[in-house]
Image: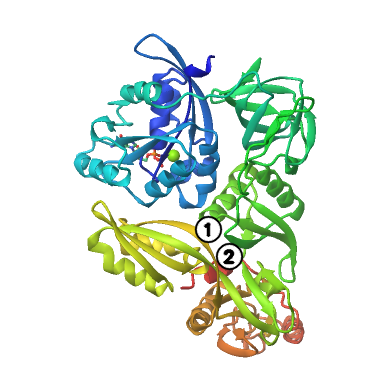
Amino acid sequence: MNQSNIRNFSIIAHIDHGKSTLADRIMEMTNTITERESKAQLLDDMQVEQNHGVTVKSRTVRNRYRDDNGQDYEFNFIDTPGHVDFNYEVAKSLAASDGVILLVDATQGIQAQTVANYRLAVEAGLKIMPVINKVDSPNAQIEMTTQQLLELDASFDAESILQISAKTGQGVHAVLEAIVNSLPAPNGDINKPLKALVFDSEYDSFKGVIASVRIIDGQVKADQELLLMANSAAFTNKEVGIFTPAKAATKQLAAGDVGYIVTGIKDPHLVRIGDTITNQNTPTDEPLPGYEPAQPMVYAGIYPQGDYNEMKDALNKLALNDSSLQLVPEVSDALGPGFRGGFLGIFHLQIIRERLKDEFGIEVLTTAPNVTYRVHLKNQPNVLTVDNPIQFPDFEQIEMVEEPMVKAIITTNDAELSAVMKLADQHKGIFVDMGNQGSLVELTYQMPLSEIAYDFFNKLKSVSHGYASLSTTLDGYKLADVVRVDVQINYARVDALTFVTHRTDAPEQTKQLVHKLKYTIPRRLYPMPAQAVVEGRVIARVDIPPLRKNAAVNGNQYSVSKKQALLRRQSINKRQAVKSDVELPQSVFNSILDLN
Ligand code: GDP
Ligand code: MG
């Protein structure tokens, strides 16, 4: 199709503002899918997405639209995730788009992720089309939302802000017309050498890596000699095609098109998101700028509940379709071989656990998550980067430690302001700025990532009765007074339970922890002390009670020989206390995660 009849756009919004619903409605109204199919929320097809009601992975769909003048258009839209953890997916989608629909829920108005995604779109130089959604709701505040949009961007014009109900379809036809009339067409050169942006990838065990691409210049057919520029990886592509949303092979993709290229490459590391694909013989002179690889925010150990090899297989397969999941093998004394996973956030970690279960039937243990520390050792010039608490050096060797910081923007309303500020304070937030975003207050804090990465978002929702929202960006490293906490059960250190925390929080946290361990560590026939050790000193301790009364005093229940055997076993157990062999169910690790 002629480029002037193509529109490539993304829908961006705060979570739950209606992106997926609008996407469904557009597909339905362009006859891309039937109404019945849309009931099944075609885009959010992963089990986890349906469980949580959120989009986790971006998806692309091509739609055909005949406008009111009888002209045919090709719409490629990319549905994007709205959760803070998945900003990286949003950035990838934007790189392949020429414009965005900025969707705002009229019952909530502009929220933190609305602003964060708006800024991403501005940075990407995209044309932005504001749309107010959920106008059918009795709680819709259309006037207020319009006002907020005008304050967000002075170039928006009140008259042209569309008001729709993605649910009922009201006003959606006007959106389709506005996509034609106010979003730009791509303007690549079809006669130049191929220049295609890889904005996503997935792995197929038969076809190898399938790259999602936006063709910037030139054209591509099947069976051509192509080149991935970042790794100088040459390949002959097996197929090209489009997303309908299912993959459908086509003869060719040309400048302006969005689709996929079957690379046939079996090593997924060769296909980097953000890379440029070109022709081997007539390469483009300049690759696209690409973008920064996803950076993990939190790390956690992943260990099998069953067979290690099965878990390893499943994890590797999952990582192929989730380029932001990082995996490095590691071994724990307590849990045996496993992996250190790097995640975009706690929600991402939760999603990975659930996908392993849903898609592979595999249950894993995940240890308490932690952030990366930069440890400066005494009399040593180089800095140690520690993403595993077990590798956190002994305190005698440490000169100083730096921890990662984030800039946190919290949006809330007046009524909840003081509760929100108190919470930020409790989480070591350093107040930076306060401003207004329409009727909302926008607070800016600098906070340690470790304070915000785990449960902060849920607490924020709870203290603000659901009103406050959060958006974060990494903001360098800062000196921190942190300590390593070792946990000993029956006098043996359990390495998988080691964690790092701020010194001032250690006494209260360890008190809570040993108390929880009392109820989560599976009991033995004899009592076991559980203790937390910081810098060589026990700072909290509790006795995990025995399973039942001691055999020696347990009346007539056992025959004499059984009693003797039991006593023998008990005393063996008491002696071999150097290397811990306690069982560690997931609840034990959750007791560290739940500390505050
Ligand atoms: P997303 O997170 O932005 O993809 O949001 P969803 O499309 O999943 O929608 C979130 C919730 O809002 C769902 O329960 C939808 O049914 C509801 N919703 C979406 N659009 C509308 C609308 O126009 N009116 C009303 N009343 N509800 C809507
Ligand atoms: Mg969605």
Compare residues 56 and 93 and report the one nearer the observer: 93
Compare residues 343 and 366 and report the one nearer the observer: 343
Q: Which mark is residue 346?
A: 1
Q: Residue 499 is drawn in which quadrant?
A: bottom right
- Disc 1 to disc 2: CB gap under 8 Å: yes
Q: Residue 545 is drawn in which quadrant?
A: bottom right
Q: Amino acid at mark 1?
A: Ile
Q: Which residue is mark 2?
A: 369
Q: Residue at x 76, y 25 (%)?
A: 282
Helix, strand or loop at mark 1: helix
x and y percentages locating residue 511 in the rendered image: 50, 83
State how the image is colored: rainbow
Are there few (<14), some (14-19), or many (20+) residues within 10 Å of tag 1?
some
Q: Residue at x 48, y 42 (%)?
A: 81
Q: Earlier in the sequence, mark 1 or mark 2?
A: 1
Helix, strand or loop at mark 2: loop
x and y percentages locating residue 476 in the rendered image: 55, 65
Q: Can residue 54 be seen by looking at this rendering?
A: no
x and y percentages locating residue 164 in the rendered image: 28, 31
